[in-house]
Image (tube, grey):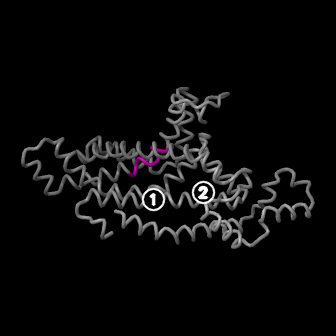
């Protein structure tokens, strides 16, 4: 396990280098002017000399390769630079928002895996039954539904029509104090929407995996020995049927991050979404690079986690050979 982790960490280095370089290259080719974004309305009445001086002070007049190298060498020392759009160090910007984004993604992902496993098992028990058709049909419909549409529908139904859950934010209107009860109440809608957006893939994968496992000889042998259907399903078929789901965990991380950005925007969740949008529109090079590096590292970690789980659960796979 340690050998696999170390090897993947070594492979991640060139990936992160290429990604961060690409961020600076794309941002440099962007039509947005970081100086005007930094100055705001004051840039409308400023002369060209003032704008040029501000451009020099911000360092955006230099080639993007020089800016990338300066950012990279500083980042290796723990300094991710200063965000021009947030007017504070990049580390503080991410630190203030990362906890809430992580909480949202973790709760949503756990709910999607658990509920998807339950629905997939129920559908696989009797292929072709009403339950199977209902679960698979709902999964295909949700698979095609955009996450922002699900989010807006949830706000309309639960916040506006039923008035049982808050429409967004982290605290109630007029209050900035975060309590456990209030946090749970405000987390239900965004986490639920994000979980629903991930649910179809886990449901369909579990249904297919468990359905195939129920047709295998070991499971048929367990039934022939007189074991109960519950034991056969949970003790034999489910374990074998969950193996394909482990590979799905790593591949769903990019979609989870993208979905989280949209969900945070709709529900005004104080995560990294607003920082990402503002950094992109203002061409905030240091913040853009740090956020992209963070997202890339999350994807690589998800792939590593999927491989580790696969190697631990499947006795046919040896971690030292991966």
Residue 108 horizontal/vertical position (percent): 46, 44
Q: Is residue 124 left or right of residue 17?
A: left
Boundaries of the magenta span: 194-201
Q: Which numbered disc flags the more N-terminal residue, 2 or 1?
A: 2
Residue 302 horizontal/vertical position (percent): 43, 57
Q: Can residue 294 be seen in this view?
A: yes
SS of the residue under disc 1: helix
Image: 210 above or below 155:
below
- Numbered circle sitting on residue 172: none
- Write down the quadrant of residue 82 in the picture: bottom right
Question: Which residue is pictured at 16% across the width and 42% down the height?
Answer: 229
Q: Is residue 121 left or right of residue 195?
A: left
Residue 314 sits inside the magenta stretch:
no
In the rendered image, the quadrant that contains the C terminus is bottom left
In the rendered image, the quadrant that contains the N terminus is bottom left
Write down the residue under mark 1. 301
Image: 157 above or below 242:
above
Write down the residue under mark 2. 291
Question: Which residue is pictured at 45% across the width and 42% down the height?
Answer: 107
The residue lying toward the viewer, choosing from 17 and 282, is 17
The residue lying toward the viewer, choosing from 310 and 5, is 5
């Amino acid at each position: 396990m340690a050998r696999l982790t170390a090897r993947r960490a070594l492979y991640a280095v060139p990936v992160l280098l290429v990604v961060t370089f690409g961020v600076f290259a794309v941002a440099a080719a962007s039509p947005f002017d970081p100086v005007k974004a930094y100055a705001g309305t004051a840039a409308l009445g400023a002369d060209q000399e003032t704008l040029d001086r501000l451009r020099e002070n911000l360092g955006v007049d230099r080639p993007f390769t020089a800016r990338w190298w300066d950012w990279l060498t500083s980042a290796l020392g723990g300094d991710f630079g200063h965000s021009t759009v947030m007017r504070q160090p990049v580390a503080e910007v991410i630190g203030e928002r990362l906890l809430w984004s992580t909480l949202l993604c973790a709760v949503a992902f756990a709910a999607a895996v658990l509920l998807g496993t339950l629905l997939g098992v129920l559908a696989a028990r009797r292929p072709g039954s009403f339950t199977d058709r209902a679960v698979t049909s709902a999964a295909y419909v949700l698979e095609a539904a955009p996450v922002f549409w699900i989010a807006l529908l949830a706000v309309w139904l639960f916040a506006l029509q039923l008035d049982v859950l808050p429409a967004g934010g982290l605290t109630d209107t007029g209050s900035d104090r975060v309590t456990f009860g209030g946090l749970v109440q405000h987390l239900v809608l965004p986490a639920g929407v994000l979980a629903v957006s991930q649910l179809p893939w886990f449901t369909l994968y579990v249904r297919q995996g468990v359905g195939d496992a129920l047709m295998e000889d070991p499971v048929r042998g367990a039934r022939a020995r007189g074991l109960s259907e519950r034991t056969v399903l949970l003790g034999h078929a489910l374990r074998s049927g969950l193996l394909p789901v482990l590979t799905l965990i790593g591949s769903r991380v990019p979609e989870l991050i993208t979905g989280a950005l949209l969900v945070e925007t709709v529900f005004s969740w104080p995560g990294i979404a607003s920082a990402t949008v503002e950094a992109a529109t203002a061409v905030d090079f240091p913040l853009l690079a740090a956020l992209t590096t963070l997202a890339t590292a999350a994807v690589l970690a998800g792939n590593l986690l999927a491989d580790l789980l696969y190697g631990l659960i499947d006795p046919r796979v040896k971690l030292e050979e991966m």
